[in-house]
Image (spheres, helix red, strand yellow):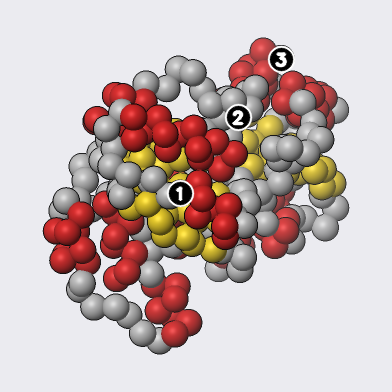
Amino acid sequence: MIDTLLSTFPTLEPGSVWLVGAGPGDPGLLTLMAMSALRQADVIVYDALVDENCLKLAGSAAELIYAGKRGGTPSPLQRDISMQLVEFARAGKRVLRLKGGDPFVFGRGGEEALTLVEYNIPFRVVPGITAGIGGLAYAGIPVTHRDVNHAVTFLTGHDSSGLVPDMIDWAAIAKASPVIVMYMVMKHLDHVSAELMKAGRRSDEPVAIAVSATTAKQQVLETTLGGVSAAARSAGLRPPAIVVVGEVVRLRSSLDWMSALSERRMHSGDWQDQLKEGL
C-alpha cells in the first residue's frame, strides 16, 4: 500500500534539486514526501544532523555525500555546498539535499534555494519537523499551552560568523515573548542568558536543554535562566541542542511521555500548582 501511495507523489526529475527536511532525528518523523525523495534520488547531499537510519531508506544506487557543518570542526563552505547542488543538477542527476529539521528554519535552505534560482535549476522544498517543536515535544515540553502562553519566539544563537546575531532585540523579545526557543546557542549561553536577565527576565525562570532530541541519545536538563550556563557545563552537555525558556518547561513533570513509556508511569496533574507558583 505504501508503494502505491508513494507512486502518486511528484517525480524528482533529472536535473532538479529537492531541498528536504529530515526532521529532528527520529527517522519515524520523516514525511512521506521525504521518503519518496530518498527512494528516487541519484545523489543525496546530507547534513551532520541527519540520522543514519534515514539514509538507509535511500535507493541502492544512490550516491551519498556528506556535507555536514558542525561548529568548531572543519566544515565545507556554504557556497561550495550550494554550487555542488548546481553541478550535480547540471549533470542530469536527480538531487536530494537532505537537511536536519526543516530546511527553511535556521537550516540555510533559503541560501541554497537562492543559488538554485541564480543558476536556473528547478527545485522543490519539502518541509520537515523542526527541532524547536518536534524535539521539545519528545522532551515533554509543548511550545504553546493556552493556560501559559499565546506567543513563542524562535531564534538562533549564532550568525554566519559564529557570533550571537547583533540584530536581535533582546529587550523586545524578553518583554513580548513568554516562551523563547533557541537553536545553536550552547556556546553563547552565558551571553544570551545575561542579555535576557538584563532585559527583565527572572533568574529563576525555568529553562530546559534538550540534547540530541528524538534520538536514542536524547538528554533533557531542567534548570533556571540564571543557572543554565553552569548547569550545562556541569552536565557536560554538547550540541546539537535546543534551549527553551519559559513557564511551559514546568509542564514536563506531567508530560514527559518518553520516560512514562519506559517506566510505565505518568505523573498526574501537578503542573497546575507548579505553574501557579511560577507565574
Q: Disc 1 vs disc 2: which is toward the camera?
A: 1
Q: Position of residue 181 (x, y in %)?
A: 41, 42
Q: Is residue 63 above or below residue 237?
A: above
Marks 1 and 3: which is nearer the front? 1
Residue that protrudes farthest toward the top in the picture: 118
Quick one: label 2, few (<14), some, or many (20+) residues within 10 Å? some
Give the quarter of the image for residue 142.
bottom left
Report helix, strand or loop for mark 1: helix
* Distance from the alpha carbon under mark 1 to that under mark 3: 45 Å
Q: Residue at x 77, y 26 (%)?
A: 77
Cα distance in 3D space between marks 2 and 3: 17 Å
Give the quadrant of residue 67: top right
Q: Write down the residue under mark 1.
A: 228
Amino acid under label 2? Arg
Q: Which residue is mark 2?
A: 108
Q: Which mark is residue 119?
A: 3
The N terminus sits in image quarter: bottom right
Looking at the image, residue 150 lies above or below residue 268: above
Which residue type carries mark 3?
A: Tyr
